Amino acid sequence: MNLTVVRGRLSRPPSIRELPSGTRLASLDVTAERDVEGERADSVPVIWRDPPASVEGLDTDDVVVVVGRVRRRFFRAGGMTQSRTEVEADVVLRARQKARVQRAVTEAGATLEDLLAG
């Protein structure tokens, strides 16, 4: 199972674009602090397919929780094959929305438990 939860601050406002397929794609950069003091923070690129309109209300320094999966995609650029590792979000919530964050994380954990039990 590929499951990740990231909590951190947006380092820039979301970038939203429409793909040729008509799918809306939001790109976010989340800076996640580490648990160990003095260690550098992690910069986590996040993509969110067909996000709700509320994504446009997010801004730099908003603290968010992302639930999704890690994926690596390959693409051609400049005649070379390149890759990028990013989190593909199922849900992005402001951290202050504690009940909704709790529910999203609990649902993800339950899915993981079901997989381990099966």
Image: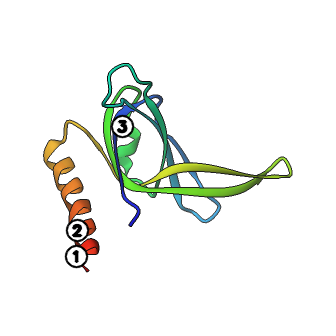
Query: Residue, x 38% and y 49% (percent of image)?
Result: 53
Type of amino acid under label 3: Gly
Marks 3 and 2: which is nearer the front? 2
Q: Which residue is denoted by mark 1 in the rendering?
A: 117
Q: Earlier in the sequence, mark 3 or mark 1?
A: 3
Q: Are marks 3 and 2 in contact (CB under 8 Å)?
A: no
Image height of 86 relative to 37, above or below: below
Report the front residue among 38 and 66.
38
Q: CA distance from mark 3 to mark 2?
A: 34 Å
Disc 3 target residue: 57
As drawn, which residue projects farthest toward the left?
99
> Sequence order check: which comes first, mark 3 or mark 2?
3
Mark 2 lies on residue: 113
Label ID, residue 35? none
Scheme of image coloration: rainbow
Q: Is residue 75 left or right of residue 87?
A: right
Which of these two is toward me, 110 or 51?
110
Q: Residue at x 36, y 29 (%)?
A: 33
User: How far across and down, in percent of the image, does residue 94 sit?
Assistant: 27, 39
The kind of secondary structure element at disc 2 is: helix
